[in-house]
Image (tube, rainbow, N blue to C red):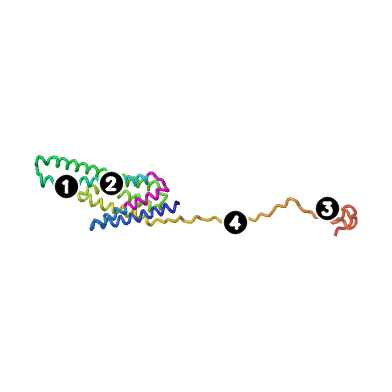
Amino acid sequence: MSNIDVKKGFQDFGRSIQIVAVCTILSIATGFTGFIALIFIFIALGNIKKINLQLNNASLEEFRSRYIRGFILGLVGFIILATGGVNIAFYFIFMPFSISGWTTLSLSIILLSAGLIFIIVGIASEIKAWKILKVFFENNSKLFPSELSSELIDGCDKLKKGTLLSAFGFLVIPGIIGFIFQVIGFFKLAKLNTLNVFDAPKEQLIVEHAYIPKTVNDIEVSINFCSNCGARLSGLGKFCALCGSEIN
């Protein structure tokens, strides 16, 4: 993988999160889109896994593991809580205040308590996940344009606060504010889909090589002979050094 592959991975992550953001809004009208949002959340986590094959960053890996852990704990907690609620309803409908029903009531209370604990721990894990992703974007801001980096950091912060406020959804107003924060946070992270995956071409330096003439170490002197006396000429001067005849 190359730097381009890493940026392509973040771009895919942004596209998946964009679908999550849209489906989260539509989930107000239909719960089916909420299920689709959940699917694309895990697709986005898969994108993070591919990115981390090259970066091998501890923060990205911890973000994935904590988010998945939070989801599993929340799901298990919801199932336990729902089971406890059904048991309590069964007790009050069929065995109200009967001695034989105390076991069912006690079990229901235990299930409700355990379910709430699982959900709370799951929410805390998800909050921590967004905080870790925020730290990653802060520490690796050079991977992204400055404006985009600021949006990503703010998006993680919004998702962290939104998750916390959504935990108090039973109070209605905090739940609404938390929902809005989460949608805004998802859309901010979705801006990764605008990331330019191709590196800007580096400026090429054109080096002009100056012509360097060859150095002549030895001057080649043509050697002739005097046409008059046959003496060997040095090639210097116009007359023969032996007989004085003019050299042609």
Q: Is residue 218 left or right of residue 245?
A: left
Mark 4 belongs to which amino acid? Answer: Glu
Which of label 3 and label 1 is nearer to you? 1
Residue located 27% across and 54% down the image? 35
Q: Quadrant of residue 11?
A: bottom left
**Do the numbered discs 2 and 1 sit on residues whose CB atoms are within 8 Å?**
no
Q: CA distance from mark 2 to mark 4?
A: 64 Å
Taking depth in this image into account, of 154 and 186 the one nearest to the observer is 186
Indicate which disc, 2 or 1, sits on the residue closer to the N terminus: 2
Residue 86, disc: 1
Q: Is residue 44 magenta?
A: yes
Q: Check disc 1 and report its element: helix, strand or loop.
A: helix
* Structural crowding at the residue carrying mark 4, measured as other residues with C-alpha within 10 Å and reported as few (<14), some (14–19) or many (≥20): few
Identify the image quadrant of the C terminus. Answer: bottom right
Q: CA distance from mark 3 to mark 1?
A: 123 Å
Task: Give the residues in magenta.
Answer: 41-58
Residue 208, disc: 4
Q: Is residue 54 magenta?
A: yes
Indicate which disc, 2 or 4, sits on the residue closer to the N terminus: 2
Residue 75, disc: none
Mark 2 belongs to which amino acid? Answer: Ile
Indicate which disc, 4 or 3, sits on the residue closer to the N terminus: 4
Residue 234, disc: 3
